[in-house]
Amino acid sequence: MFVSASAAQPGAGVDAVLTTTVVDDVVTTDDVVALRDALRGALGTTRQDLAPAVDADWRTSWPMLAELGLPALCAPEEKDGFGLRADAAVAAATELGAALHGGPFAGLTASVHALAHAADDPVADALLAGVLTGRRVCAFGRLGRDGRVGQNERVARLVDGVPGADALLLLDDSRDDLVLLLDPADWTADPSRHRFDITRTCADVMPVAGRGHRVAVPGDAARRAVALYELLLAADAVGGVRRMLDRTVAYAGQRQAFGRPIGGFQAVQHRLADHAVRARGMTLVVAEAARRFDDEPSQTRRDVALASVSVSSGAPRLLHDLLQLTGGIGFTWEYGLHFYERRAHQDARLAANPRAAQRSLADVEGWTDGR
């Protein structure tokens, strides 16, 4: 079990005037259900009448969420984790996305998985212990192919959780290893190009020359950490889709036009039903990737690429149309539905964008062998 506290009860259904079925998570075990419901209670996502709120002070409440076991979901049991529970991590990422949580959960979980596989590294072990207890937050990023600590050409583009995180784990593609930065003084950050999504912080990071601890992990562990990062970003966007679809359906059951709820008009019903089907498809493909995450590496890569393609290309379009269905109120800061569309676009960018996911899927399927 991840949680021992009593789970929060899900909110009531939408108005019966609508024929749309609202999508929900695909959960298969009692412990994941308990974790999901506890998170919904802690994050306040059980009530559709509450507008989404951006919490810039998420670090204050993070230790409470860490007590539910969130940082340990993909750490080995011998390192005080729960093993590779990708299904539970996906459930958690979905709820955090629905709540517009400001923390870098995808990157933190990927960092924990990589750090837990570091070979005889007391520096990595000390940071891992702090992250698992919620005292520290480690973000995850990728240095450019020409990026090396100690040289001028070094930058990690688009690192989620900076500023906010107090440690960074950066994958150095040029050396196939990881660079660990243990203090914000070890890097400079430029967030100026990444302010479209206001629910989270994000910045380009430049390590300070001479700083950084090299972490050696097996190649499969590093690749699995990247796959986990991309899968959880897809789950984050799916959580936003679910939450926004719920709220749009509720709005359509309440908003009156020509003496009846707008959800009573067939054109609105059809669009909402179509979106529920699409959202369900995205939920299922992410859940399937989580279920098979510990399979053979090429199969894992294929499943994650398929989930990333499906969500990064589909979620922004779906969310934009839901925004249109709410009329002018969806664009207001008070109602806040546009926050989810911004966040879904950022999730796609953090995961290296839909085109990169399509290329990865084509590679693993062998469609590019002749080129």
Image: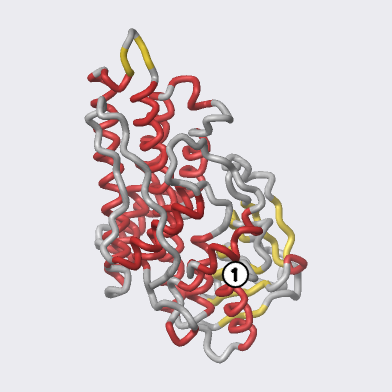
Question: Farthest residue toward the top?
Answer: 258
Give the quarter of the figure containing the C terminus: bottom left
Q: Residue at x 63, y 42 (%)?
A: 195
Question: Farthest residue toward the front?
Answer: 6
Q: Residue at x 53, y 78 (%)?
A: 115
At label 1, the amino acid type is Gly
Residue 286 found in image quarter: bottom left
Is residue 52 something that shows in the picture?
yes
- Disc tally is 1
Left or right, residue 265 beside residue 124? left
Question: Farthest residue toward the bottom?
Answer: 120
Residue 278 found in image quarter: top left
Badge 1: residue crowd in 10 Å (few <14, some 14–19, many ≥20):
many
Q: Residue at x 44, y 20 (%)?
A: 327
SS type, badge 1? loop
Q: Position of residue 284 (x, y in %)?
A: 26, 53
The colour scheme used to paint the residues is secondary structure
Q: Is residue 40 above or below residue 299?
A: above
Q: Residue at x 62, y 78 (%)?
A: 127
Left or right, residue 156 beside residue 45? right
Q: Is residue 245 above or below residue 238?
A: above
Q: Position of residue 99 (x, y in %)?
A: 49, 47
Residue 317 found in image quarter: top left
Left or right, residue 258 beside residue 186? left
> Is residue 357 or residue 315 the one in the foreground?
315
Q: Position of residue 237 (x, y in %)?
A: 42, 48
Residue identified by numbered label 1: 134
Is residue 231 something that shows in the picture?
no
Give the quarter of the figure containing the N terminus: bottom left
